[in-house]
Amino acid sequence: MADIPQDDFELPGVPDSFQRLWTPHRLAYVKGGQEQYAGDNRDPFCAAPDRSDEESLIVRRGETCYVIMNLFPYNAGHLLVCPYEHISLYTETSEAQMLEMGELTKQCMWTLTKVANPGGFNIGMNQGAVGGAGIAQHLHQHVVPRWGGDSNFLPIIAQTKAITQTLGDMRTQLAENWVSSAPEPAEGKGN
């Protein structure tokens, strides 16, 4: 080791050539993953409604379903519409759950449009672990706002997504500006 110049050693606190985007909130998922909920009816979507809206990041509560912030968002404002009942597939929803999921999805879109003015949305459900569901035991529908240019190389190259706002701040903005009925068409736009 005497032949290696001192400059080749990295010292704590000394900048190097790498940029870092810290995502400590993902540690719980990395450590636990899908297996932590196997066979357990108290998955996060069952437990969330028992806590305060602020603690659980619940944006809106309905009769059979509720809206919650995604802890691992694709974009700022990524919402999940979940039934209170512990069911895993869309085919298991009651008519009331199915209708309320649809209505809350529209309200998510109206509210996100009011608060963040996205250019579009991705809406969908991943069902079953093989289908890509992060928590396959509890049905949930994603509502992801999209903007032009919101995709870049970070998720592909660095497996990192830059999110511009904290979950708590976004939850507060959405909850305080919730839109429950269709907004009036903008001046000059037809029906």
Image: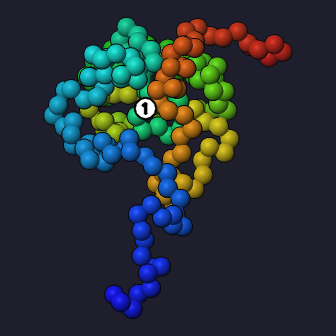
Q: Quadrant of the N terminus?
A: bottom left
Estimate the x, y position of residue 93 in percent, counting from the top left. 33, 19
Residue 132 lies, with reference to residue 177, above or below; the image says below
Quarter of image, res 97: top left
Farthest right residue?
A: 188
**Three-letter residue code for mark 1:** Asn
Residue 119 lies, with reference to residue 181, above or below; the image says below
Residue 71 lies, with reference to residue 86, above or below; the image says below
Estimate the x, y position of residue 126 in percent, counting from the top left. 39, 37
The reply to whether residue 105 is in sight is no
Picture residue at 76% right of the left edge, 14% below the top: 186
What count of labels does the image hold?
A: 1
Q: Which residue is mark 1?
A: 70
The reply, left or right, for residue 137 in relation to residue 169 is left
Q: Nearer the viewer, residue 23 or 139?
A: 23
Picture residue at 21% right of the left edge, 40% below the top: 36
Q: Nearer the viewer, residue 90 or 123?
A: 123
Of helix, strand and loop, which one carries label 1? loop
Estimate the x, y position of residue 168 in percent, counting from the top left. 46, 26
Q: Quadrant of the C terminus?
A: top right
Scheme by which the image is coloured: rainbow
Picture residue at 27% right of the left edge, 16% below the top: 50
Farthest bottom residue?
A: 3
How crowded pointer 1 is (Cα within 10 Å; few <14, some 14-19, many 20+) is rated as: many
Quarter of image, res 71: top left
Residue 35 lies, with reference to residue 156, above or below; the image says above
The reply to whether residue 14 is in sight is yes
Quarter of image, res 63: top left
Picture residue at 33% right of the left edge, 45% below the top: 27
